Image (cartoon, coloured by chain):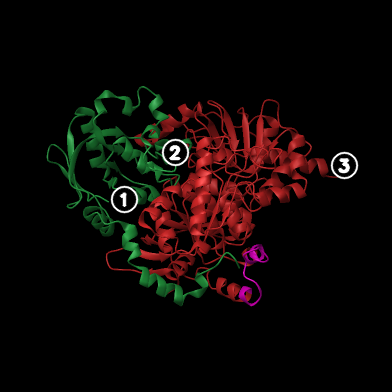
Chain colours: A red, B green
Amino acid sequence: MPKTLFEKIWDAHVVSHPPNSPAVLYVDLHLVHEVTSPQAFTELRQRGIKARRPLQTIATMDHSTPTTPRGADGLIPVTDAMAVTQLKTLVDNCNDHGIPVFELGTEKQGIVHVIGPELGLTQPGMTIVCGDSHTSTHGAFGALAFGIGTSEVAHVLATQTLLQNKPSTYEIRVDGQLQEGVTAKDIILAVIANIGIGGGTGHVFEYTGSAIRSLSMEARMTICNMSIEGGARAGLIAPDETTFDYIQGRPHAPQGADWDKAVAYWRTLPSDEGAIYDKQLILDANTLAPMITYGTNPGMGMSITERVPDPKQISDNSQKMALDKALAYMDLQPGQPLLGHKVDVVFVGSCTNSRISDLRQAAEMIKGHRVAEGVRMLVVPGSQTVKRQAEAEGLHKVFVEAGAEWREAGCSMCIAMNGDQLQPGQYAVSTSNRNFEGRQGRGGRTFLASPLTAVASAINGVVTDPRTMVAERAYEVSPA
Amino acid sequence: MEPLKPFSASLVPLPIENIDTDQIIPARYLKVTDKNSLAEGCFTDWRQDPDFVLNNPRYQNGHILVAGHNFGCGSSREHAPWALKAYGFRAVISTYFADIFRNNSLKNGLLPIVVDAETHQALLDLAEEAPEAEIHIDLASQTVTLPNGQKASFPIDPFSKTCLLEGIDELGYLMKQTPEIEAFEVSHPARVQTLQS
C-alpha cells in the first residue's frame, strides 16, 4: 500500500506496540533548552537514572537569555538572578549526564530550532523532539519533529523513546508562484487563517505542491515552524535536492560513503504516488498577498489590504466573544484597515524568521532608508553562526546605519522572558510566531507578519504593504 | 503518582475559546527550576481584571474549570497544567483540547474532559445558576454527573485511563521496555548517531 512520508518515518521508529497502549517510538535526536528541562533532570536524579543516549542529545540556551551586547570581558551579561540559576542548572545537568551544551555567547549557541539545521544535526527521516512546540521547524527536512512536555523530556532522556498515539495526516498543497513581496511567512499565515488555530489538532501536516518545492530550506523552515499554530504538532516537507544541498558539508552531515548511503535512503522517503491523507487543503500561491494578523491568535489573520472583521457578522457566539475580546485587547475597531496603523516596535527575529536569508531580505529592504522616528527596531539573529555570517556580509552595519538595534542571538522579544519586551499598549509588527495576549510583554499588541512587511512598516512608522516598497525599489534601479 | 479516585467539585466557568498556555501561565513565570511555585502565575494577567471569574467570590470554591473550545493551545510548557493544579484545579472540561496540553495534563493527574456542546452548555448554565453546585467525575466509568442526575460520558485512551486509575507512572512503564529498546538500537545502528562524528 502506498505510504505517506509521515507513515514511512513513523513505521521506521516503532520500537514496540503493546496492545491497548500507545506505540513506543524511538527518538533519534533530542534537543534541550534551559526552560523546559530542569524538572525533567530532577525526575531522573530522584530515580537515579542517567541519560540513555547523551550523544543523541544536545542542549543550548535561548529562551531566558538576554540579547544585549557583550561587556568589555566579551561575555553577555545576565542580570536576572532566576535566569542565572536556570542557565547554571542546565550546565550542571548536562555535565552530570555527559550531554553537549552550547553555553550563552559561545560559537554554536543560538535558538534551538536554528542551530539543529545549521549544524547538520537535523536530517531527513529522523525523529526529533524538544520541550518546545516549535520543534515542528525541523520537519522542513522531512524529519518527524514535534514538541513535547517536560514529563516527556524525562522519558526521552531516560529511554530515548516516547509513548505516542499515531496522529492522522493532513496534506496542505500550495501550487503556483508567489508574487514579488509575498513570502513563505505569508503562506503559513494564510494556511492558519484558513483552517484556524485548532484546525490541525491530532494531525501531522505535509506541505506539498509546486510553491513549496520552489522554496529554499530556510523558507521551508518558516512554514513548518508555524504548523503548531494551526494545531498540528508536526509539519513535514519531503526531502529533495534543495534539502540535500543544504545539508551537505555541514558539521554533522554524513560524509563520503556515508553521505551517499544517507542520500539513497532519503530519496526513498517522499510520499508514494497514490498515498492517502486523512484531510487536505489546497491553496493557490498566485493569489496570495502579504498577510498580517489583527487579533490575539495566529489564526486571526488576513491579507494586509483587508479590513478588521466585524464580530457582529459572526453567528457562532463563542467565536464572536473571542473576536470581541481580541479587538478590545488590540484596541482595534471592526472595519478598520491595518494599513497606516501606527507601529511602536518592529521585531525581526525568532525561530520563525531569524536565519541568514531573513536577515538578508530585511537588510536589502532597509538599505538606504531609516527606521521612522519614534519606532524601535530590533534585529536578533537566530544563532551566533547567523550573527557571524551577517557581520561578515556587513548586514549589521546596514541595520545600525538605518537606526535599528543589532543584538546577540536568542528568542528575544518572541517570548518576553529575557528582558526584550513590549511596553503595555505598544504595537509591534513582529516576524515571530505568536500574537497571544501578553506574549511579547504584558499589554503589548502584536501584528504577525513577514520580515519584508516588518521592515517596510519600520521605515514608514505605520503598517505598510511591502509590495509598495518592492515596486519603489524596482523603479529606482530601472533605467531612465 | 497517586491513583485518581472519583470526586465531586464545583465549577468555574471560562467559556472563551482558544485559551492559550501563555494566558494560563505567562512566560515570565517559566524561569523556575521546580514545579511548585506556579500558582501565583496561573492566569495572572487576566486576574488583574477585577471582573475576571477567578476574582468572583461566587467561584472561590470551584475546582473544575469549564473552558471554551481548543483549550491549552500554543506553547508546549508543562508549566500550564502544573500551574492549574497548583491553583487548585483537578479537571478541565472543554469541547476540545490542544494535543500537547492534553498529554501534559494526563501526565499530571489533571483530567482533560471532552464533552459535547450540549453538555458543555449545561455545565455553563449550572455554574451560572448554582455556583456552589457540585458535579461528580468518575474516570472508571468515564462519566460526568450533574446534580440533576444528568450524565455525560467522556472519551479517554485506555492507556492513560489505566495509568491514572492505578497510579502507574509512565516513565516506570517505559523503563520496563528497555530490552525492546536495546534490541531496536542493535537492529538499527544508523539510528544511534553520535554528535562527535
Q: Chain under label 3?
A: A
To the question of a shared chain for discs 1 and 3, the answer is no
Question: Residue at coordinates 22% horizontally, 49% vertically from top-left?
Answer: B4
The residue labelled by disc 1 is B106
The residue labelled by disc 2 is B22
Q: Nearer the viewer, mark 3 or mark 2?
A: 2
Which of the 4 image quarters holds residue A291?
Answer: top right
Residue A220 vs residue A476, the one in the foreground: A220
The residue labelled by disc 3 is A480
* Image position, residue A265 (x, y; %): 55, 74
Residues rendered magenta in the picture:
A244-259
Question: Residue at coordinates 36% horizontally, 42% vertically from top-left?
Answer: B82
Separation of marks 3 and 2 at Cα, in angstroms: 53 Å
* Image position, residue A78 (x, y; %): 59, 38
Which of the 4 image quarters holds residue B148?
Answer: top left
Check disc 3 and give the amino acid type.
Ala
Check disc 2 and give the amino acid type.
Asp
Question: Residue at coordinates 56% horizontally, 31% vertically from top-left?
Answer: A422
Q: Chain under label 2?
A: B
Check disc 1 and give the amino acid type.
Leu
Q: Is residue B53 left or right of residue B145?
A: right
Instruction: Determine the secondary structure under disc 3.
Output: loop
